[in-house]
Amino acid sequence: MTLLAKIDPTSISRRERLLLDLILSEDWEKESDLAQILWPDDQFKMEYFRQTREKLYGRTISLVLNFEGQSHNQKVFSEAYREFAAIQILKAHGFRKEFLVFAEHLVKKAVRYEIPEIIVSVADSLVKYYGSIEGSYKEYKKYLKLAEEFEVIHLSEKRIQRLFSGLSIDFSQSRNGKAKTSEKLLSCIDFIENTPFHDTYRYRYYVYYIRCIYAHLQGDIETLDRTCNEALVYFQGKSYPVPNSVQFLFGFEQKASLALQLRDYDRALKTVQWAKETMSTSPYNLNVCLIYQATIGFHAGLDDLVREAIAESAEYQASGQQEEQWVIIRAYAHLLGILPDERFRLSRFLNELPKFSKDKAGLNVSIITIQMLHYLKQGDYDQLIDRREALQKYCNRYLKGRADGFIRMLLAVPLHQFDPKAVEFYALEKGYLQELVEGGKVADSEIVPFERLWEEVMAELMATKKKETA
């Protein structure tokens, strides 16, 4: 959808403009909805829709071919794939000499920037050309060797990428509980240890990332640091600039994430400060740094860090999940008295967030907690009682670990008629409070530590009880 938004509306027909506006509005579910809006009474509306859609999408091809990206790597890859498309056309139309010049130039570029899929395909074409057309045994052997070498590399890269993708799903679903080394992680480690090691950017990226995940699951911050530092040395030593995102991942995100989970707030904060001061960062990366800074402030009880992060975030535009995270951070800051002068309206808060976050065990935990705290502070007990059954089902379906225990403690508040002693007894009897007190890894959903939120809940219940008995 973003690429379609780059189409110049003056360069397309009126019908295409109407369809483009409807597509970009995203206020539709099926293509038939769009056809019904544009041609409500026409029996051929779906045919008209398909014709218009093909013309409109066809115009994006020129945008794609001219899209160069912003980073050095994006530009190099864009150029390489444009050249690859060009030589396929030259080969198909029988322009052999032109094909040869472009193909040999592209192979050299693809080798330098380690793009095995292009190397293999173009080298195979050159093998065929020098073997069956030109009859040059020397050149035939040269490109055959190149094709076979990078075919092995390309296959290994694809295999480790697929293993990593499966591991990422497993890892993200296990981090909120007591993480154990999964079968998928063992498969990844086994693959790394029992297959030839390739000294290419993409292969090394996945190897380092998998080792970082292993260190995360083991809670081994020293091994994680060594792995990240080794990765940085390797990528910074490449003959071409690597994406900033890679340096940001291994130089900051991996280190800060595990330090926060292990409650090593000094180390986490130093990592944030290092990233802000030394790395060339985009608004997106700076927002990541500031979100971590605010989270560290909540967890370490350093409220000035939270205020500073919120104030600084105004300088950098956020979008998508980052924007949602800032809405949640500001709401927590208000409810915890960190931003006492900031007005909080629950209806506005809920309107700024999706009704059902795709991250069922993440942002929704904060959304639920903020609503419960707000109702509690406002003395709106009816809302707390009305929501209890639905939230009980939500816990059973989506939550585990610390998040599950904390939300169940919240649900006990209306269950025990808002009596602080009864609520605390329940939390102790079920072991939920002990689990929070004893610690363990911080859950990803804990923008504010559950211990601090529970103290706030109990303080509100005690204050209400005191007023009732006064």
Image (spheres, rainbow, N blue to C red):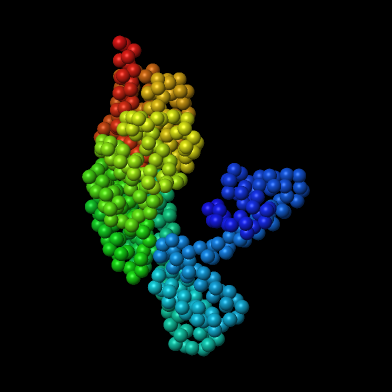
Q: Residue 236 in the image: state x and y as whole percent.
A: 30, 64
Viewer-proximal residue among 204 and 21? 21
**Residue 349, located in which quarter of the rendered image?**
top left
- Residue under the image location 47 percent in, 32 percent down: 348
Please state the total of marks drawn on the protein image: 0
Viewer-proximal residue among 308 and 356? 308
350 left or right, relative to 377 = right
- Tell me if I can see residue 257 in this picture: yes
Query: In the orientation shown, which residue stands out farthest toward the front?
Result: 10
Viewer-proximal residue among 15 and 374? 15
383 left or right, relative to 438 = right
Q: Relative to 255, is 340 above or below?
A: above
- Tell me if I can see residue 148 in this picture: no
Q: Relative to 414, is 108 above or below?
A: below
Q: Residue 423 in the image: state x and y as whole percent.
A: 33, 22
Query: In the orientation shown, which residue stands out farthest toward the top?
Result: 470
- Residue under the image location 58 percent in, 46 percent down: 25
Q: In the rendered view of the protein, which quadrant contains the C terminus?
A: top left
- Residue under the image location 71 percent in, 51 percent down: 46
Q: Residue 341 in the image: state x and y as whole percent.
A: 35, 30
**Residue 435, located in which quarter of the rendered image?**
top left
- Residue under the image location 33 percent in, 32 percent down: 339
Q: Relative to 265, is 418 above or below?
A: above
Q: Residue 390 in the image: state x and y as whole percent.
A: 48, 29
Viewer-proximal residue among 167 and 53? 53
